[in-house]
Amino acid sequence: MVSDFIFDGKALSDFGYMMIFENSEEVISVSGMQFETIKAALSDISRKTSHTYESNYTSTFLIMKNSCDYDDGEFLSHDDVSELTRWLARKQYKWFRFIDDDDDDEIWYKVQIQVSKEYVGDNVIGLRLIVTANAPYGFTREFTKSNTELEEGEDFDIRIYSDEEGYIYPTCVVTCPTAGTLTITNTTEGRVTRVANCSANEVITFIGEDTQQIISSDTTHDFTKHFNYVFPRLYVEYGNYNNTFECEINGETPEVTFSFRGIRKVGFDG
């Protein structure tokens, strides 16, 4: 039974509160993907042109004081509401997950939370939270994979389980052991990332997710001239979850670390 959650690194129970779901019979969407289609003239066959998600994950529940943690009654004071609102009502999406003691599988969401007060008479008995994710699915915990962990002769394989086919752009940090042109090749799909004019000991970071930025410890490195703007990515298709990378600069192997999350379509019901 879920009665707790983590938001921006803090748990609801840290504040002495618990969750209450009002409707256990609610239908929880797992995937709302829809196809956009067209039909040729005089044909009954629909052909897909694209896919869309009509809405992102959302969940509504109450939070109330846990009577085991409070001796001053069950009602919320202005200070109580203020403390919780500072934590929950933020101007940026923050990482969130339900805590389920019966499930070791961590599902994370980036969310925004709307907060309103629930009254009994003139007293505030709790807060109603509307939690809305920034995506129509959740994510795994963050995984890291580095080629420094490999045995001699071992391939640099990254295996990623994801419930969505397509591409995941990880954060990739590269330390160049020497000067030259850096190449990172995903041999699974033949995709090559190339950065020229790298300097010895330069640290290059490819920032993944939706931003797709590149930064360097060498502030003089002009990526507009030396980067082919092909960001490293992980390719996912049903039944094939492995990506193999080859990394090289001037005949040497740089240190490369990938950080990434897989996509999970399991609903948003705690």
Image (spheres, rainbow, N blue to C red):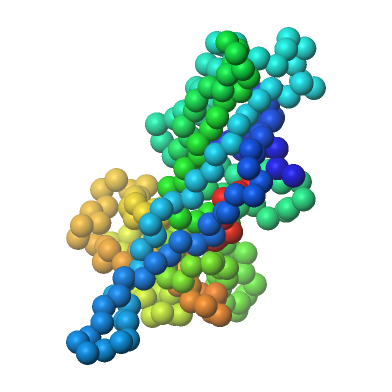
Disc count in the image?
Answer: 0
The answer to whether 55 appears left or right of 42 in the picture is right
What's the residue at 50%, 25% (across, down)? 116
For residue 144, above or below residue 1 = below
Q: Quadrant of residue 252?
A: bottom left
Q: Residue most toward the right?
A: 68
Does residue 220 appear in the picture of this structure? yes
The answer to whether 110 appears left or right of 80 in the picture is left
Q: Quadrant of residue 147?
A: bottom right
What's the residue at 65%, 72% (across, down)? 151
For residue 231, above or below residue 46 = above
For residue 239, above or below residue 61 = below
Q: Where is residue 214 drawn, in percent x and y? A: 33, 53
Q: Where is residue 85 drawn, in percent x and y? A: 51, 23
The answer to whether 56 appears left or right of 146 in the picture is left
Q: Residue most toward the bottom?
A: 42
Q: Where is residue 5 drawn, in percent x and y? A: 64, 38
In the image, 42 versus 193, the foreground residue is 42
What's the residue at 31%, 81% (across, down)? 47
Q: Where is residue 264 drawn, in percent x and y? A: 55, 60
What's the residue at 60%, 49% (across, down)? 26
Q: Quadrant of the N terminus?
A: top right
